[in-house]
Protein backbone atom coordinates (compact mmCIF):
# COMPACT_ATOMS: atom_id res chain seq x y z
CA UNK A 1 0.00 0.00 0.00
CA UNK A 2 2.84 2.38 0.86
CA UNK A 3 6.25 2.01 -0.69
CA UNK A 4 8.92 4.59 0.00
CA UNK A 5 11.98 4.11 -2.18
CA UNK A 6 15.35 5.73 -1.59
CA UNK A 7 13.66 8.95 -0.47
CA UNK A 8 15.80 12.03 -0.10
CA UNK A 9 14.18 15.27 1.04
CA UNK A 10 15.36 18.63 2.25
CA UNK A 11 13.98 21.76 3.84
CA UNK A 12 12.93 23.98 0.94
CA UNK A 13 14.02 27.18 2.62
CA UNK A 14 17.65 26.38 3.39
CA UNK A 15 18.33 23.13 1.54
CA UNK A 16 19.19 21.07 4.66
CA UNK A 17 18.76 17.39 3.86
CA UNK A 18 16.66 15.66 6.53
CA UNK A 19 15.55 12.44 4.83
CA UNK A 20 18.59 10.64 3.43
CA UNK A 21 17.77 7.53 1.44
CA UNK A 22 14.78 6.18 3.33
CA UNK A 23 13.19 2.87 2.34
CA UNK A 24 9.96 1.58 3.85
CA UNK A 25 7.17 -0.73 2.73
CA UNK A 26 3.85 -1.01 4.56
CA UNK A 27 1.28 -3.54 3.37
CA UNK A 28 -2.50 -3.44 3.46
CA UNK A 29 -3.84 -4.53 6.83
CA UNK A 30 -0.51 -3.90 8.51
CA UNK A 31 0.21 -1.76 11.55
CA UNK A 32 3.78 -0.46 11.26
CA UNK A 33 5.55 1.41 14.02
CA UNK A 34 8.26 3.94 13.26
CA UNK A 35 10.52 4.60 16.21
CA UNK A 36 13.67 6.61 16.60
CA UNK A 37 15.33 9.21 18.79
CA UNK A 38 14.29 12.86 18.74
CA UNK A 39 15.42 14.70 15.63
CA UNK A 40 15.75 11.61 13.43
CA UNK A 41 13.21 12.84 10.88
CA UNK A 42 10.00 11.10 11.94
CA UNK A 43 7.78 14.20 11.85
CA UNK A 44 9.47 15.39 8.68
CA UNK A 45 8.53 12.10 7.03
CA UNK A 46 4.89 12.59 8.04
CA UNK A 47 4.89 16.15 6.63
CA UNK A 48 6.34 14.88 3.36
CA UNK A 49 3.67 12.18 3.16
CA UNK A 50 1.04 14.89 3.67
CA UNK A 51 2.59 16.95 0.89
CA UNK A 52 3.70 19.99 2.84
CA UNK A 53 5.44 22.52 0.65
CA UNK A 54 8.16 23.37 3.15
CA UNK A 55 9.98 20.19 2.08
CA UNK A 56 11.42 19.21 -1.30
CA UNK A 57 11.89 15.66 -2.45
CA UNK A 58 15.18 15.55 -4.35
CA UNK A 59 15.44 11.82 -5.07
CA UNK A 60 13.43 8.63 -4.77
CA UNK A 61 9.69 8.09 -4.76
CA UNK A 62 6.64 7.51 -2.59
CA UNK A 63 4.19 5.01 -4.06
CA UNK A 64 0.66 4.64 -2.72
CA UNK A 65 -1.17 1.64 -4.19
CA UNK A 66 1.59 1.48 -6.78
CA UNK A 67 1.35 5.09 -7.92
CA UNK A 68 3.60 8.00 -7.12
CA UNK A 69 1.99 10.67 -4.95
CA UNK A 70 4.81 13.20 -5.32
CA UNK A 71 2.88 15.31 -7.81
CA UNK A 72 -0.34 15.24 -5.77
CA UNK A 73 -1.26 18.22 -3.58
CA UNK A 74 -2.36 17.67 0.04
CA UNK A 75 -6.08 17.77 -0.84
CA UNK A 76 -5.64 15.13 -3.55
CA UNK A 77 -3.73 12.91 -1.13
CA UNK A 78 -6.51 13.24 1.45
CA UNK A 79 -9.14 12.48 -1.18
CA UNK A 80 -7.18 9.36 -2.10
CA UNK A 81 -7.54 8.15 1.51
CA UNK A 82 -4.30 9.27 3.15
CA UNK A 83 -4.81 10.66 6.64
CA UNK A 84 -2.18 12.17 8.90
CA UNK A 85 -2.59 12.91 12.58
CA UNK A 86 0.12 15.38 13.44
CA UNK A 87 2.32 15.65 16.50
CA UNK A 88 1.19 19.26 16.86
CA UNK A 89 -2.35 19.53 15.44
CA UNK A 90 -3.06 22.94 13.98
CA UNK A 91 -5.44 25.34 15.71
CA UNK A 92 -8.12 26.71 13.40
CA UNK A 93 -9.74 29.77 14.98
CA UNK A 94 -13.18 30.65 13.64
CA UNK A 95 -14.01 27.14 12.41
CA UNK A 96 -16.15 25.10 14.78
CA UNK A 97 -14.93 21.49 15.05
CA UNK A 98 -18.37 20.26 13.95
CA UNK A 99 -18.29 22.41 10.84
CA UNK A 100 -14.77 21.27 10.04
CA UNK A 101 -15.83 17.62 10.36
CA UNK A 102 -18.84 18.13 8.12
CA UNK A 103 -16.81 19.82 5.38
CA UNK A 104 -14.06 17.18 5.61
CA UNK A 105 -16.47 14.24 5.57
CA UNK A 106 -18.43 15.62 2.66
CA UNK A 107 -15.26 16.33 0.68
CA UNK A 108 -14.26 12.71 1.25
CA UNK A 109 -17.70 11.49 0.15
CA UNK A 110 -17.56 13.68 -2.94
CA UNK A 111 -14.17 12.16 -3.85
CA UNK A 112 -15.82 8.72 -3.60
CA UNK A 113 -18.75 9.86 -5.74
CA UNK A 114 -21.23 9.87 -2.84
CA UNK A 115 -23.92 12.41 -1.88
CA UNK A 116 -23.26 14.82 1.01
CA UNK A 117 -24.52 13.64 4.40
CA UNK A 118 -27.88 14.86 5.64
CA UNK A 119 -27.62 16.76 8.93
CA UNK A 120 -29.29 14.13 11.16
CA UNK A 121 -27.10 11.40 9.67
CA UNK A 122 -23.99 13.51 10.20
CA UNK A 123 -24.92 14.27 13.82
CA UNK A 124 -25.56 10.63 14.56
CA UNK A 125 -22.16 9.58 13.22
CA UNK A 126 -20.34 12.34 15.09
CA UNK A 127 -22.13 11.63 18.37
CA UNK A 128 -21.36 7.92 18.20
CA UNK A 129 -17.71 8.48 17.36
CA UNK A 130 -17.29 11.15 20.04
CA UNK A 131 -18.91 8.92 22.68
CA UNK A 132 -16.55 6.07 21.81
CA UNK A 133 -13.63 8.40 22.53
CA UNK A 134 -15.17 9.80 25.73
CA UNK A 135 -15.37 13.24 24.14
CA UNK A 136 -17.91 15.77 25.29
CA UNK A 137 -20.02 16.85 22.34
CA UNK A 138 -19.97 20.43 23.69
CA UNK A 139 -16.26 20.54 22.86
CA UNK A 140 -17.07 20.03 19.19
CA UNK A 141 -18.88 23.37 19.08
CA UNK A 142 -15.60 25.12 19.88
CA UNK A 143 -13.13 26.14 17.15
CA UNK A 144 -10.95 23.21 16.09
CA UNK A 145 -8.07 22.61 18.52
CA UNK A 146 -8.21 26.18 19.88
CA UNK A 147 -7.59 25.96 23.62
CA UNK A 148 -7.81 22.14 23.54
CA UNK A 149 -5.44 20.40 25.93
CA UNK A 150 -2.78 18.11 24.46
CA UNK A 151 -4.98 15.08 25.15
CA UNK A 152 -8.09 16.73 23.67
CA UNK A 153 -6.19 17.54 20.47
CA UNK A 154 -5.13 13.92 20.12
CA UNK A 155 -8.68 12.72 20.66
CA UNK A 156 -9.91 15.22 18.07
CA UNK A 157 -7.42 13.73 15.59
CA UNK A 158 -8.62 10.20 16.26
CA UNK A 159 -12.22 11.39 15.95
CA UNK A 160 -11.45 12.77 12.49
CA UNK A 161 -9.74 9.54 11.55
CA UNK A 162 -12.75 7.47 12.64
CA UNK A 163 -15.15 9.64 10.68
CA UNK A 164 -13.09 9.99 7.51
CA UNK A 165 -12.37 6.26 7.17
CA UNK A 166 -8.99 6.66 5.46
CA UNK A 167 -7.05 3.81 3.83
CA UNK A 168 -3.61 4.87 5.04
CA UNK A 169 -3.35 6.45 8.49
CA UNK A 170 -0.17 7.98 9.82
CA UNK A 171 -0.15 8.99 13.48
CA UNK A 172 2.76 11.10 14.69
CA UNK A 173 3.48 10.82 18.43
CA UNK A 174 -0.17 10.30 19.22
CA UNK A 175 0.85 9.31 22.74
CA UNK A 176 2.56 12.57 23.67
CA UNK A 177 0.57 14.62 26.16
CA UNK A 178 -1.75 11.75 27.03
CA UNK A 179 -2.32 10.40 30.52
CA UNK A 180 -2.80 6.64 30.91
CA UNK A 181 -6.60 6.76 30.61
CA UNK A 182 -6.53 8.93 27.50
CA UNK A 183 -3.80 6.72 26.03
CA UNK A 184 -6.08 3.72 26.47
CA UNK A 185 -9.02 5.49 24.82
CA UNK A 186 -6.95 6.71 21.89
CA UNK A 187 -5.30 3.28 21.43
CA UNK A 188 -8.69 1.56 21.49
CA UNK A 189 -9.81 4.07 18.85
CA UNK A 190 -6.85 3.18 16.65
CA UNK A 191 -7.26 -0.55 17.23
CA UNK A 192 -10.91 -0.29 16.18
CA UNK A 193 -9.67 1.06 12.85
CA UNK A 194 -7.45 -1.96 12.17
CA UNK A 195 -8.81 -3.65 9.08
CA UNK A 196 -7.54 -5.85 6.23
CA UNK A 197 -7.88 -3.02 3.72
CA UNK A 198 -6.26 -0.30 5.81
CA UNK A 199 -2.65 0.35 6.76
CA UNK A 200 -1.70 2.25 9.90
CA UNK A 201 1.69 3.81 10.57
CA UNK A 202 2.30 4.74 14.19
CA UNK A 203 5.21 7.07 14.90
CA UNK A 204 6.45 7.09 18.47
CA UNK A 205 9.69 7.25 20.36
CA UNK A 206 8.38 5.34 23.37
CA UNK A 207 7.42 1.72 23.54
CA UNK A 208 4.48 2.59 25.82
CA UNK A 209 1.97 3.19 23.01
CA UNK A 210 2.95 -0.11 21.40
CA UNK A 211 1.76 -2.04 24.44
CA UNK A 212 -1.72 -0.89 23.47
CA UNK A 213 -1.37 -0.82 19.70
CA UNK A 214 0.63 -3.96 18.98
CA UNK A 215 2.46 -3.44 15.67
CA UNK A 216 3.09 -6.04 12.96
CA UNK A 217 6.40 -4.39 12.09
CA UNK A 218 8.79 -1.97 13.76
CA UNK A 219 11.23 0.29 11.93
CA UNK A 220 13.97 2.38 13.48
CA UNK A 221 14.50 5.76 11.85
CA UNK A 222 17.81 7.48 12.47
CA UNK A 223 19.36 10.42 10.61
CA UNK A 224 16.73 10.20 7.91
CA UNK A 225 17.08 6.48 7.15
CA UNK A 226 15.44 3.27 8.30
CA UNK A 227 18.42 1.58 9.92
CA UNK A 228 16.67 -1.51 11.24
CA UNK A 229 13.33 -3.30 10.79
CA UNK A 230 11.85 -6.13 12.79
CA UNK A 231 8.72 -7.36 14.49
CA UNK A 232 7.23 -6.17 17.78
CA UNK A 233 10.11 -7.68 19.73
CA UNK A 234 12.36 -4.96 18.28
CA UNK A 235 10.32 -2.35 20.18
CA UNK A 236 10.83 -4.26 23.44
CA UNK A 237 14.51 -4.55 22.73
CA UNK A 238 14.75 -0.79 22.16
CA UNK A 239 12.89 -0.13 25.38
CA UNK A 240 15.28 -2.32 27.32
CA UNK A 241 18.55 -1.31 25.65
CA UNK A 242 17.91 2.12 24.12
CA UNK A 243 18.75 3.13 20.56
CA UNK A 244 22.54 3.08 21.01
CA UNK A 245 22.94 -0.62 20.15
CA UNK A 246 20.93 -0.43 16.95
CA UNK A 247 22.67 2.80 15.92
CA UNK A 248 26.07 1.20 16.59
CA UNK A 249 25.19 -1.86 14.47
CA UNK A 250 24.20 0.35 11.56
CA UNK A 251 27.25 2.61 11.74
P1 LIG B 1 11.58 13.78 14.95
O1 LIG B 1 10.14 13.94 14.65
O2 LIG B 1 12.14 12.44 14.63
O3 LIG B 1 11.91 14.19 16.34
P2 LIG B 1 11.90 15.93 13.04
O4 LIG B 1 11.43 15.38 11.75
O5 LIG B 1 10.96 16.84 13.77
O6 LIG B 1 12.40 14.77 13.99
O7 LIG B 1 13.24 16.75 12.78
C1 LIG B 1 14.38 16.19 12.15
C2 LIG B 1 15.46 17.23 12.05
O8 LIG B 1 15.15 18.19 11.06
C3 LIG B 1 15.69 18.03 13.31
O9 LIG B 1 17.06 18.27 13.45
C4 LIG B 1 14.91 19.31 13.05
O10 LIG B 1 15.43 20.37 13.78
C5 LIG B 1 15.10 19.49 11.57
N1 LIG B 1 13.99 20.18 10.89
C6 LIG B 1 12.85 19.62 10.45
N2 LIG B 1 12.06 20.52 9.83
C7 LIG B 1 12.71 21.69 9.90
C8 LIG B 1 12.42 23.02 9.42
N3 LIG B 1 11.29 23.30 8.76
N4 LIG B 1 13.34 23.98 9.67
C9 LIG B 1 14.49 23.70 10.31
N5 LIG B 1 14.81 22.48 10.78
C10 LIG B 1 13.95 21.48 10.57
MG1 LIG C 1 8.48 14.42 15.81
Image (cartoon, helix red, strand yellow):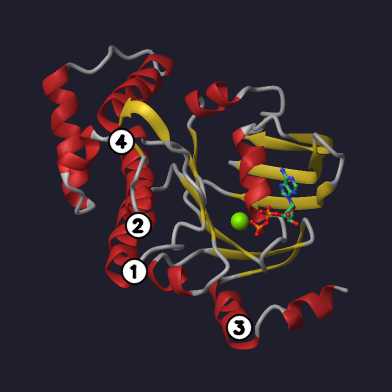
Relative placement, left or right, of 12 versus 206 is right
Q: Are marks 4 and 2 in contact (CB under 8 Å)?
A: no
Give the alpha-carbon distance from disc 2 to disc 3, as whole Å.
Answer: 28 Å
Q: Which mark is residue 179?
A: 1
Q: Tell me which label, 1 or 4, sits earlier in the chain.
A: 4
Q: Identify which residue is drawn at 64% across, 32% down.
A: 51
Q: Tell me which label, 2 or 3, sits earlier in the chain.
A: 2
Q: What is the quadrant of residue 150 in the picture? A: bottom left
Q: Residues within 10 Å of mark 3 (few under 14, many from 20)?
A: some
Q: Nearer the viewer, residue 90 or 67?
A: 90
* Residue pointed to by mark 2: 151
Q: Nearer the viewer, residue 161 or 147?
A: 147
Element at label 2: helix
Q: Identify which residue is drawn at 58% across, 71% down.
A: 231
Give the alpha-carbon distance from disc 3 to disc 1, as whole Å.
Answer: 24 Å
Whether disc 1's CB lies below 8 Å from ligand 2 is answered no
* Residue pointed to by mark 3: 237
* Residue pointed to by mark 4: 163
Amino acid sequence: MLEIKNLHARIAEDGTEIIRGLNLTVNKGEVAAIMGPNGSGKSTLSYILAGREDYEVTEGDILYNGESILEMDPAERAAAGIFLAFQYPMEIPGVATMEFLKVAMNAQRKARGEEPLKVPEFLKLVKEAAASLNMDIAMLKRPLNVGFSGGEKKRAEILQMKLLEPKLCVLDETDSGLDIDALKIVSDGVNALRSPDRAIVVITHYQRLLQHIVPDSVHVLYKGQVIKSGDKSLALDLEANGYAGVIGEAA
